[in-house]
Amino acid sequence: MIIISHSTADTEAVGKALSERLLAAGKRHAFLSLRGEMGVGKTALVRGFAAPLGCRGVKSPTYTVVNEYKGDPLPVFHFDLYRVADEEELYGIGFDDYLAREGYCVCEWSENGGDMLPKNRITVTISRLPSGENERQICIEGVDDEDLGI
């Protein structure tokens, strides 16, 4: 599925739609793999994703690797693997323990996670479009179009 975002608010709305559909489907666990260059809107998508769960103050966990937000009814585990050097570092922060917990794992720079990423995941790739400074193409794989209602 490909969605064109014209603003940060549009990107947040895509994240919101993703979490609302997971909740409506009764999914108590999901892994979202976020890809895209620096400043493309990955954290905006996470902010939108976390909003229906009551999570506020979402910011990139670049220096802490993971921020945990106590959502209702489920937590959101927000990872940023930009500075992660190898899988050993992920073991050190308990990445595999987060994957086993009930809740939603949303992972920026997931390509740095190597073989530790779960096979069953939703992949979201955000790219800048040349047509405008704020326009983005959001490609979502691993979920049906009708699941999102976008």
Image (cartoon, rainbow, N blue to C red):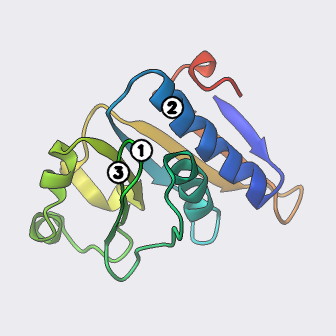
**Secondary structure at numbered mark 1:** strand
Residue 118 against residue 76 in the figure, above or below = above
Measure the C-alpha gap from mark 1 to mark 3: 14 Å
Please give the name of the residue rendered at 53% of the width and 71% of the height, measured from the top-left corner. 57
Please state the horizontal and vertical placement of residue 120, each as a whole percent of the image: 30, 31
Whichever of labels 1 and 3 marks the residue nearer the N terminus, that label is 1
Residue 117 against residue 66 in the figure, above or below = above
Q: Residue furthest right?
A: 131
- Tag 1: amino acid: Leu
Which label was assigned to residue 74?
none
Q: Horizontally, is 42 left or right of 111 in the view?
A: right
Measure the C-alpha gap from mark 2 to mark 1: 10 Å
Rendered-image quadrant of the C terminus: top right
The residue under label 1 is 32
Rendered-image quadrant of the N terminus: top right
104 or 34, which is in the foreground?
104
102 or 140, which is in the foreground?
102
- Tag 3: amino acid: Pro
The mark lying in front, picked from 1 and 3, is: 3
**Secondary structure at numbered mark 2:** strand
Please state the horizontal and vertical placement of residue 127, each as a whole percent of the image: 66, 54
The residue under label 3 is 75
The residue under label 2 is 141
Q: How many marks?
A: 3
Residue 90 against residue 101 in the figure, above or below = below
